[in-house]
Amino acid sequence: MFAQVSTVIVKVTHRCNLDCLYCYENITKQGEDMQLATFRQLASQVLQASQKHDITFLFHGGEPLLLPNAWYEEAIQTAQDLAYQYKKRVHFTMQSNLLGLTEAKINLLQTYKIALGVSFDGVMEDTMRGGEAKVLANFLRVRQAHISAGILTTINAQNYQHFDKICHFLHKDVGLRTFKANVVTPVGAGLAMEALDASQTFEAQHAILEYMIATEGKALIETNLMREIKRYFATEEERLREPQTLCHEKRCGAGSTVVGITPQGDITPCGRFAWNEEAYFIGKLGEDSPTDYSAKLHKFHALVPQNWYDCDTCSAKRICGFGCQAFIVRSRSKANVDCLPTKMRYAYYEANAERLKNLLRRA
Ligand code: SF4
Ligand code: SF4
């Protein structure tokens, strides 16, 4: 069942030292973290079964820095030994809020070359996360220590009107060249929230695009939008040559190229599920039942097909990422909330093609 897997999202804990209003996990302050034996079994099954040469383990949570260094040292050594045995290469990344950063953790990240994705929503007084000043200070510390680290921002109800300022800040004050801005979907802790409407999402993305154009691609690039712009301008030949992406296909890589693992060893289609959302478990480590796995996975991808009723005749399909199936099935609306903003971005690309071409040349 792991034959095509190249990315494993390892939920090492469901504990967190923050309590973000939109968190898609079911966070607890206490609880059992992943046992090393569970990680060992995971690494062993994946490295033995996957036909891919390069496998990335993404340490996720909860907040992964809450686990002690000794856990990572042993887990990484185990994965490296297994990779050697199966003639594969392993890579390690971590999605963190960096609040628990210490000098010892910096050493750990350096020693094992763990690349970081850092969650940070900007510098407004009122964000939906908390701890921004400390997160930012720690982000600058890891960059000073030459650890590969990028910023993952969300577009949410509190910040969608401020992306011109956020872009300026990330570029001028933080010195970033690229960042990612994912749209929040109300699931998990945020299930009761209203989703941003299409014009609010587009307002944020429009501000980012205008910032990228105004700075001629020499300042800050938002990587989701840049990939989309490249898709927009690609010739048919170039499109055919494009490697398949994890998320931006009509049937995404959930459960095939990527899997998520809960601290208890349950397998989910990807990392965007809560550790205790049993309805979406597609297997359990150590239980070898590929038929059951395939059937459950097929059912997951086939849920709510009404979201794609007019894709074939839609001109925006040229750039479309088709939404996130995990967020669609977990949301109250069961809607692909990215559909309308995608159509709005496509209309924007059509109207601004000349300005965007300049950006493409520089980026
Ligand atoms: S924008 Fe909407 S209708 Fe068009 S291809 Fe994407 S999901 Fe389908
Ligand atoms: S479920 Fe969402 S995050 Fe997971 S692979 Fe699919 S599109 Fe990507």
Image: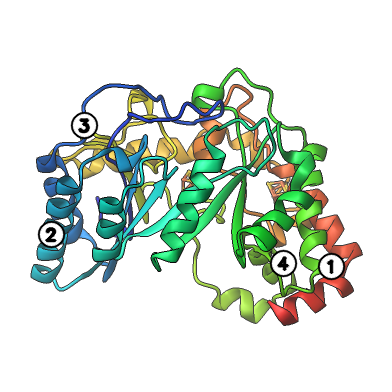
Residue marked by disc 4: 229
Q: Residue at x 69, y 54 (%)?
A: 169
**Disc 3 CB within 8 Å of nearest ligand 2 atom:** no
Q: Is residue 76 visible?
A: yes
* Secondary element at tag 3: loop
Gap in Å between the C-alphas at discs 2 and 4?
Answer: 40 Å
Q: Residue at x 54, y 35 (%)?
A: 327
How many callouts does the rendering have?
4
Q: Residue at x 67, y 30 (%)?
A: 126
- Contact between labelled residues 4 and 2, with CB atoms less than 8 Å apart: no
**Which disc is residue 77 wearing?**
2
Q: Amino acid at mark 2?
A: Gln
Q: Amino acid at mark 1?
A: Ala
Gap in Å between the C-alphas at discs 3 and 2?
Answer: 21 Å
- Contact between labelled residues 2 and 1, with CB atoms less than 8 Å apart: no
Question: Mark 2 or mark 4: which comes first in sequence?
Answer: 2
Question: Mark 1 or mark 2: which comes first in sequence?
Answer: 2
**Which disc is residue 214 wearing?**
1
Question: Mark 1 or mark 3: which comes first in sequence?
Answer: 1
**Disc 2 CB within 8 Å of nearest ligand 2 atom:** no
Of circles 1 and 3, which is in front? 1
Gap in Å between the C-alphas at discs 1 and 3?
Answer: 48 Å
Gap in Å between the C-alphas at discs 1 and 2?
Answer: 47 Å
In the foreground, 286 or 88: 88
